[in-house]
Image (cartoon, rainbow, N blue to C red):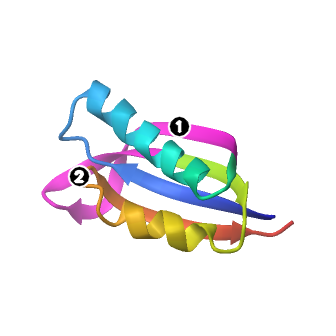
Amino acid sequence: MNKYEIALVVSTKIDDETVAATLERVKNRVEKSGSTITDIDEKGKQKLAYEIQDMTEGYYYFIHFEGPEDAPYFIERHLRIYENVIRFLIVRQDA
């Protein structure tokens, strides 16, 4: 099992309930990939480095998980189609 981190930016154009539902969808997708979530670091609303889709702020989350080698590909394939996720990055962490 490898250790990974997802840096996730969620749209601020949605209400708090939808933000929570989006985060729950992402967590479910990570678990369906055969991975185990070890930590979720919620940074809250922060300013974006540049404007994305007419937004200057986003909700930032860092999700740490352990999973098989193909998990990032499985997760990324689904994150690309989530409307409320405006940016994400999955990286492998050193052991």
Q: What is the magenta range?
A: 37-60
Name the residue type under label 2: Thr
Mark 2, residue position? 56
Based on the displayed image, in which of its 4 quarters is residue 18 positioned?
Answer: top left
Q: Answer yes or no: do the residues labelled 1 and 2 have beta carbons within 8 Å? A: no
The N terminus lies in quadrant: bottom right
Residue 89 visible from this viewpoint: no
| Residue at (63% x, 74% y) in the render | 70
| Residue at (26% x, 49% y) in the render | 84
Residue 74 x/y as whole percent? 52, 68
Would residue 71 appear left or right of 76 to someone viewing this image? right
The C terminus lies in quadrant: bottom right
Q: Earlier in the sequence, mark 1 or mark 2?
A: 1
Residue 73 x/y as whole percent? 53, 74
Name the residue type under label 1: Glu
Callout 1 secondary element:
strand
Residue 43: in magenta span? yes
Residue 42: mark in rendering: 1
Other-residue count near label 2 (Cα within 10 Å), few / some / many at <14 / 14–19 / ≥20: some
Residue 15 x/y as whole percent? 22, 29
Residue 44: in magenta span? yes
The answer for how far apart the CA atoms under marks 1 and 2 are is: 18 Å
| Residue at (50% x, 39% y) in the render | 43
Q: Nearer the viewer, mark 1 or mark 2?
A: 1
Would residue 70 appear left or right of 47 to someone viewing this image? right
